[in-house]
Image (cartoon, rainbow, N blue to C red):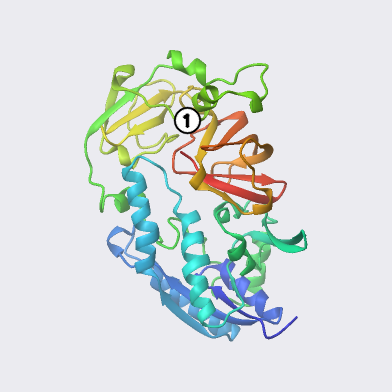
């Protein structure tokens, strides 16, 4: 190992990044620990705890224990601009953002990476449960984003928007380990974070209730909850036509299957009231506070302009299940640029639309206007603004924002 290689580790004050720093030091890297302070608005935290101060102290104590330099960097302004403002805008528009994916693309592997490069770092490292591979394509190095070895903790989905340039500079020291092994190493090294609970909540914001957080800018506003019957005629058009290969579907069929439905108030019956359509997301079951429906009630669409929530009864409601989705051209991202589909091409991949969701077989079709993704098995709760990520085996190939 070249001992001269310098790596800046994003020490979050948790056990994963602590062990990442320890392992890198053991491997002979020159390691610098850096804590990112991304949020300091305590008005929306759940308890009186001040999570970032506690985390920052833990990160500093880990660095001290490992004998590595430590510094904190305040990225709260950039975080507000790139993540928080994006979240508010997406929820206001009735879409479901994924701040963790954006945080990795925009903060950890962009602003943080640039800060590390000012310290003349060769790499940045995080405590993510994923792995990096390298292959040669036409004589050039191509980096692979691979699933973490622990299937319960694989975080490759959260990194699905990284580019080749970002992956080139990234290290994931704990990706080959199981979570219990990480805790074991932390205990053996007597790190203060060994028994610390994993952080929950928004990326780097800490212990925050999402509705409280959103209410900072999106004020409560009473509106109707409507239930949509499952026998509406247009649901027939959303079914996969029998006997026709996906590649031969015409544009009308593709759009019917893959684009979200625009419901109208005339199609539904009022069941109750809510306090703001922008607080709800497609597929949501909790928080509707409507009783006596027999079957569970799910959100199948939200209209933030008219402030209406559309719901469906039961897990098999055709408004809750979708056979496909669409990603606009400008929203498509290929980690493996060498596998990019050209217009008219198609490919079979495994795909998921949320973290921890089992991968599901899908056909990707590239058309002039964007990418159509048709699943072999209908998906529940496909929400605009979420990310779809597609895989080949353990490797994340690309991703895109769902329209």
In this rendering, position of residue 370 left or right of residue 274: right
Label 1 Cα crowd, 10 Å radius (few <14 / some 14-19 / many 20+): some
In this rendering, position of residue 127 left or right of residue 201: right
**Picture coordinates of residue 113, whole percent (x, y):** 52, 71
Quarter of image, res 296: top left
Q: Viewer-proximal residue, 75 or 287?
A: 75
**Depicted 278 relative to depicted 148: above or below:** above
**Picture coordinates of residue 369, whole percent (x, y):** 51, 37
**Depicted 25 relative to depicted 125: above or below:** below
Identify the residue under disc 1.
259
**Picture coordinates of residue 5, whole percent (x, y):** 66, 81
In this rendering, position of residue 322 left or right of residue 272: right
Residue drawn 73% across the image and 83% down it: 2
Q: Viewer-proximal residue, 264 or 178?
A: 264
**Picture coordinates of residue 334, whole percent (x, y):** 60, 51
Residue drawn 60% across the image and 31% down it: 374
């Amino acid at each position: 190992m070249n001992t001269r290689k310098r790596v800046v580790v994003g020490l979050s004050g948790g056990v994963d990044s602590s062990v990442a720093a320890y392992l890198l030091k053991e491997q002979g890297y020159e390691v610098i620990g850096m804590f990112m302070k991304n949020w300091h608005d305590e008005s929306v935290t759940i308890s009186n705890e001040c999570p970032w101060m506690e985390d920052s102290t833990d990160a500093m104590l880990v660095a001290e224990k490992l004998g590595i330099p430590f510094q904190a960097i305040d990225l709260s302004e950039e975080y507000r601009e790139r993540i928080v403002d994006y979240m508010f805008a997406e929820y206001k528009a009735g879409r479901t953002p994924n701040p963790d994916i954006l945080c990795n693309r925009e903060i950890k592997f962009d602003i943080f990476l640039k800060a590390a490069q000012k310290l003349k770092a060769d790499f940045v490292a995080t405590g993510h449960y994923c792995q990096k591979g390298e292959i040669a394509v036409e004589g050039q190095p191509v980096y692979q984003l691979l699933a973490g070895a622990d299937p319960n903790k694989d975080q490759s989905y959260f990194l699905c928007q990284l580019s080749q340039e970002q992956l080139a500079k990234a290290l994931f020291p704990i990706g080959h380990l199981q979570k219990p092994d990480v805790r074991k190493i932390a205990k053996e090294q007597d790190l203060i974070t060994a028994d610390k609970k994993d952080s929950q909540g928004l990326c780097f914001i800490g212990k925050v209730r999402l509705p409280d957080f959103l209410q900072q800018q999106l004020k409560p506003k009473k509106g109707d909850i409507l239930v949509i019957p499952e026998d509406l005629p247009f649901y027939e058009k959303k079914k996969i036509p029998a006997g026709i290969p996906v590649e031969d579907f015409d544009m009308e069929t593709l759009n019917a299957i893959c684009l979200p439905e625009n419901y109208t108030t005339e199609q539904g019956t009022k069941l109750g009231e809510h306090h703001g359509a922008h607080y709800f997301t497609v597929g949501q079951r909790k928080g509707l506070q409507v009783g006596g429906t027999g079957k569970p009630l799910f959100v199948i669409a939200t209209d933030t302009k008219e402030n209406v929530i559309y719901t469906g009864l039961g897990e098999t409601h055709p408004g809750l299940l979708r056979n496909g989705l669409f990603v606009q051209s400008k929203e498509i991202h290929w980690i493996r640029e060498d596998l990019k589909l050209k217009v008219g091409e198609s490919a079979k991949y495994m795909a998921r639309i949320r973290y921890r969701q089992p991968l599901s077989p899908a056909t990707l079709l590239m058309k002039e206007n964007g990418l159509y993704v048709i699943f072999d098995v209908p998906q529940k709760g496909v929400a605009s603004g979420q990310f779809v990520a597609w895989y080949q085996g353990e490797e994340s190939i690309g991703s895109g924002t769902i329209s």
